[in-house]
Image: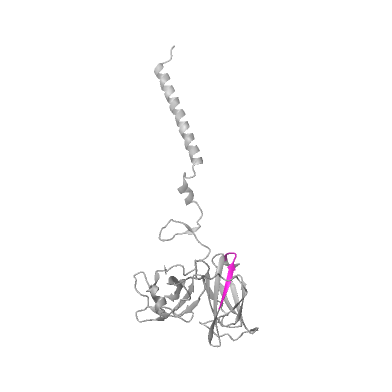
Amino acid sequence: MSPNPRVSTLARLALFAGLLALVFAGAALAGSALDPDVDRETASSDAPEGGHSAGGDEGASHSTPPDAPAKGLAQAAGGLRLVADDPHEVTARQQLRFRIVNEKDATVRDFDVEHARRMHLIVVRRDLSGFQHLHPVQIADGGWQVPLRLAGAGTHRVFADFSTGGESHTLGTDLQADGRLAARELPHPAPTAKTDTGLEVRLEQARDQVRFTVFEDGRRVKDIQPYLGARGHLVALREGDLAFLHVHPESEASEGSDIRFSVEYPSEGRYRLFLQFKLDGRVHTAAFTREVGEAHGH
C-alpha cells in the first residue's frame, strides 16, 4: 500500500519545526552564559548592602568613605556659603569683609562660641607659608571684618571656621595678591621646630594623638597659659588641596606640661601642623611638617 503524500508532508513539517525550537532554545542558553548583562538587574538586587543613598536618589548605591571628608575645600557646604566682599581689593585696603549666607542668600547673624570665639579666620598662602589666625569682628549688617595683610604675592586660602545652630562649619575661598610669586618648598618633617619667638617645641606622635612640649633655654616650660579655652590651638592643613582637618584638644589639654591633640588624617600625604599657645601673655606659633604614610596617621 503506497503512503499518503499529504501525511508524509505534515510529518516532515512537524519534525522541522521541532528541530528549529531546539536550535533557538540552545542559542538562548548560550547567550545567557556569555553575555554578562543578562539578568544584571536581578543579580544586583541580590547583592549585599554596602552603600547609602545620596541626594535623594533612592536606590542609587554609593560606597561610604571610611571617614568624613576634610573641611574647607568648598566655598559653600551644609547650606551655607562664604561671600567675601571685594576680595581683589583686600591688598590695597588691608581690610577683609565677608559674610556667611544661607540658601536664601540671607546673611547669617547668629553664631555659637567655639574655642572662646564666634568666628575664627585662618589665612595661609597656597604653599603653606604666611600662616595667620585672626578673629574678625561682626558688624551691624551681620557680616564680619578684620584687618588683613597678605604675606607675599600669590594665591592665599582663607578659611572661616565657625559654629551656628550647634553645628560646626569650615568654608574656604581664595584671595589673590599681585606681584612676583616666590613659592617656598615645604620643610622636611622634623621632630622639633622654633616658634616665631625663638622657643623650641618638640613633637611626638602616637597613632592619632600628637603631643607638643615647649622648651626655653633647654628647660621644659610648665607654665603655659590657657589659649582659646585650652592649653593650645592646632590647625592642620593637607599639602596640595589645603584641606582643613578635624583637630580636637585632648580632655586634659588644659592641665600638665604637654599640649595634646587628636588629629584625624583622612589620607596619605604631607600635612602642615600649626601650633599656637600662650606664654607670658603672648601667643607663640610653631609649624611642623607631618608625613602620613598610611590613612589615619598610623
The reply to whether the magenta stretch includes residue 287 is yes
User: What residue span does the magenta drawing correspond to?
Assistant: 286-295
Instruction: Name above or below for residue 161 compared with residue 53.
Output: below
- 29 or 10, which is in the foreground? 29
Residue 201: percent from the left, percent from the top? 60, 79
Residue 124 lies left or right of residue 207; in this view the side is left
* 290 inside magenta stretch: yes
Quadrant containing the N terminus is top left
Asked whether the viewer can see residue 23, the reply is yes
Image location of residue 34, percent across then percent down: 51, 40
Q: In the drawing, does residue 290 fall left or right of residue 37? A: right
Residue at x-position 58% and y-position 77%: 260
Q: How is the image coloured?
A: one colour
Q: Residue at x 42, y 24 (%)?
A: 13
Residue positioned most to the bottom? 280
Total tally of numbered discs in the picture:
0
Task: Give left or right: position of 143 versus 209.
Answer: left
Q: Is residue 98 visible from the viewing direction of this image?
A: no
The C terminus: image quadrant: bottom right
Q: Quadrant of residue 93?
A: bottom left
Between 152 and 10, the one nearer to me in the picture: 152
Q: Quadrant of residue 164?
A: bottom left
User: What is the residue that sits farthest to the front in this orientation?
Assistant: 180
Our reading of the magenta stretch's main secondary structure is: strand
- Most distant residue in the right direction: 218
Percent position of residue 116, x then y = 48, 82
Front residue of this view, candidates 201 and 117: 201
The x, y position of residue 230, in whole percent, is 54, 81
Residue at x 45% of width, y 29% of height: 20
For residue 83, above or below residue 17: below
